[in-house]
Image: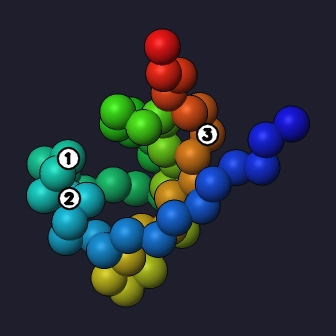
Amino acid sequence: MNQNQVQTVPQFLLEKKLGKKLGKDETFTTKTGTWKVIEIGVETYTLELVYAATTS
């Protein structure tokens, strides 16, 4: 079983990329997989990779 990857990113970068603000427990998909917001800091989002995209 894989351990989930957790990443902390600056809010402004993620909001610029997605074009919106995110709420706690909200998910979004990128080319690397599906991420879930697990914590919202003052200027950062802490994300957990819940489903990694498969490469073929």
Residue at left offset 33%, top offset 55%: 22
Task: Indicate which disc, 2 or 3, sits on the residue closer to the N terminus.
Answer: 2
Residue 6 picture location, percent across and down:
60, 61
On the image, the x and y values in percent for residue 55 come to 48, 21
Disc 3 marks which residue? 50
> Label 1, label 3: how many angstroms apart (C-alpha)?
18 Å
Asked if residue 30 lies left or right of residue 33, the reply is: left
| Label 2 element class | helix
In the figure, 49 relative to 22: above or below? above
Residue for badge 1: 18
Q: CA distance from mark 2 to mark 3?
A: 19 Å
The amino acid pointed to by label 1 is: Leu
Label 2 Cα crowd, 10 Å radius (few <14 / some 14-19 / many 20+):
few
Front in this rendered view, residue 5 or 41: 5
| Res 45 quadrant in image | bottom left
Q: Are marks 1 and 2 in contact (CB under 8 Å)?
A: yes
Q: Quadrant of residue 1?
A: top right
